[in-house]
Image: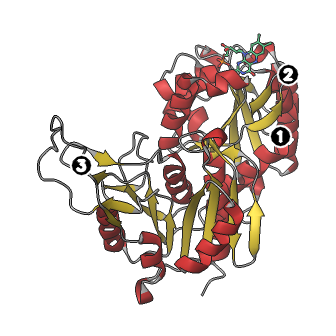
């Protein structure tokens, strides 16, 4: 472990959710590491856990009022957010996440979150339907794109007797994320350049029509954000997507596979390449210059396809410009693991992240992913995780191994 954790301070914002019952345990774990904890409760949070409990365990004053003359003269609400090394929201209710995404500052907790200049981690906790709701999905995408770190949530049985994603991560998991964020080595990829490709490609048929695929770019963009969070300088070469650009990442927008290859090669040299884009294998041999017309009575036109360049194989065989670690993605609908291993060998890349994109898995375009990581030492099966979590784990694995590769 790096610098003494005893010198670190966490501002712990507690929102109103049933998972607040896990907060005393989290404070106990943090204090056990010598980390200073200052708690701020929302009004709703105080319905679930008493300020007295948190004050006793944190050995510190607990704040909840914005308009407190005493608190304001003693420390000042802006100072409260600045004197911490890290801001953690646990549990993060659907409501506080919405307020954060919207930039509201309507109580002490959200005012501090808007005023802070420190890294923010959130540990969402809510009913599975609240987590899956389009509003929460959009709010989480906004927060992630601004660099907010997301811990969990886990999948499992919840207090409301429903099962699915939305269960707050366990205190030990939140502690691990906090320790990782507080470590001076929390930016192990500092000084390295990572190239990430993401999204689909569009291959024109004529000026108005194109061949595409269902890739949303969610996984690739999350990987770019996760690598940037670990300190890498990231160039994200993205096909047409509607997900927001990750903060702190250079985004190069392209449409076709050939443009994606050009932009990727132009981004070299890179230490790491993660090819998460769903690049079209084929393009139309010669796209029409004008819109192809429907001719009454005539048969529909035939479209002749030709092979696109293979970006993963090209980067893997880039000679002296080859990134030290090249990671490819394999979207498969059958024999996922076997195909992943074959693809690793065929493309000459170091790792393959394989996922099962049969429509019934909901992975393509969805929020979660169950991947298999094929490396030189075998295949690991990861559980179904939010795409941000897959990205964080992959980035951590990359950071771990990049030091070992000459
Ligand atoms: C018994 C009970 C349990 C609740 N659990 C949750 C929860 O786990 N997650 C959540 O987002 N909201 C939950 N709520 C609703 C929030 O407390 C409510 O949205 C509140 O406005 C949140 O305010 P805050 O974000 O300012 O803390 C619960 C409400 C009740 C009555």
In the rendered image, the vertical position of residue 290 relative to residue 113, given as above or below: below
Identify which residue is drawn at 58% across, 35% down: 81
Tell which of 114 and 274 is nearer to you: 274
Quarter assignment of residue 263: bottom left
**Residue on which the image places disc 1:** 170
Image coordinates of residue 393 in percent, x first then y, are: 67, 57
Q: Earlier in the sequence, mark 2 or mark 1?
A: 2
In the rendered image, the vertical position of residue 351 relative to residue 12, given as above or below: below
Residue 301 tag number: 3
The Cα–Cα distance between marks 3 and 2, rounded to whole angstroms, is 58 Å
User: In the displayed structure, does residue 185 sit left or right of residue 286?
Assistant: right
Q: Quadrant of ligand 1?
A: top right
Callout 2 environment at 10 Å: few (<14), some (14 to 19), or many (20+)? few
Q: How many labels were placed on the picture?
A: 3
**Residue depth check, mark 3 versus mark 2: number of the one nearer the observer:** 3
**Residue on which the image places disc 2:** 159
Quarter assignment of residue 344: bottom right
- The N terminus, quarter of image: bottom right
In the rendered image, the vertical position of residue 187 relative to residue 20, given as above or below: below
Image coordinates of residue 76 in percent, x first then y, are: 57, 27
Image coordinates of residue 107 in percent, x first then y, are: 58, 17
Tell which of 170 and 15 is nearer to you: 170
Q: Earlier in the sequence, mark 3 or mark 1?
A: 1
**Residue depth check, mark 2 versus mark 1: number of the one nearer the observer:** 2
Tell which of 339 and 74 is nearer to you: 339
Secondary structure at numbered mark 2: loop
Identify which residue is drawn at 62% across, 62% down: 353
């Amino acid at each position: 472990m790096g610098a003494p954790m005893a010198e670190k301070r966490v501002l712990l914002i507690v929102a109103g959710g049933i998972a607040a019952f896990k907060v005393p345990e989290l404070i106990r774990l943090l204090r056990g590491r010598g980390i200073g904890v200052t708690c701020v409760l929302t009004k709703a949070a105080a319905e679930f856990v008493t300020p007295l409990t948190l004050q006793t365990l944190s050995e510190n004053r607990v704040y909840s009022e914005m308009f407190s003359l005493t608190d304001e003269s003693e420390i000042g609400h802006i100072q409260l957010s600045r004197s911490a090394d890290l801001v953690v929201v646990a549990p993060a209710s659907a409501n506080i996440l919405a307020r954060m995404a919207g930039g509201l500052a309507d109580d002490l907790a959200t005012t501090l979150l808007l005023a802070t200049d420190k890294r923010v981690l959130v540990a969402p906790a809510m009913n599975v339907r609240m987590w899956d709701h389009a509003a929460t999905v959009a709010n989480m995408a906004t927060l992630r794109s601004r660099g907010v770190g997301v811990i969990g949530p886990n999948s499992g049985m919840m207090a409301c007797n429903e099962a699915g994603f939305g269960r707050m991560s366990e205190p030990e998991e939140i502690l691990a994320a906090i320790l990782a964020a507080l470590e001076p080595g929390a930016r192990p990829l500092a000084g390295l350049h990572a190239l990430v490709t993401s999204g689909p490609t569009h291959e024109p048929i004529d000026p108005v029509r194109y061949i595409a695929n269902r890739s949303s770019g969610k996984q690739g963009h999350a990987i770019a954000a996760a690598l940037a969070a670990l300190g890498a300088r990231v160039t994200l070469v993205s096909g047409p997507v509607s997900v927001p650009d990750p903060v702190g990442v250079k985004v190069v927008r392209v449409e076709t596979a050939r443009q994606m290859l050009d932009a990727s090669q132009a981004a070299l040299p890179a230490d790491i390449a993660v090819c998460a884009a769903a690049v079209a294998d084929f393009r139309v041999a010669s796209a029409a210059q004008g819109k192809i017309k429907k001719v009454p009575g005539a048969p529909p036109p035939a479209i002749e396809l030709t092979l696109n360049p293979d970006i993963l194989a090209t980067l893997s065989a880039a000679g002296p410009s080859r990134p030290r670690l090249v990671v490819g993605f394999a979207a498969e609908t059958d024999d996922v693991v076997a195909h992943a291993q074959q693809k690793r060998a065929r493309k000459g890349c170091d790792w393959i992240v394989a996922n099962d994109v049969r429509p019934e898995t909901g992975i393509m375009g969805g929020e979660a992913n169950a991947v298999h990581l094929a490396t030189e030492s075998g295949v690991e099966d990861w559980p179904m995780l939010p795409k941000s979590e897959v990205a964080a784990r992959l980035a951590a694995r990359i950071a771990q191994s990049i030091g070992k590769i000459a």
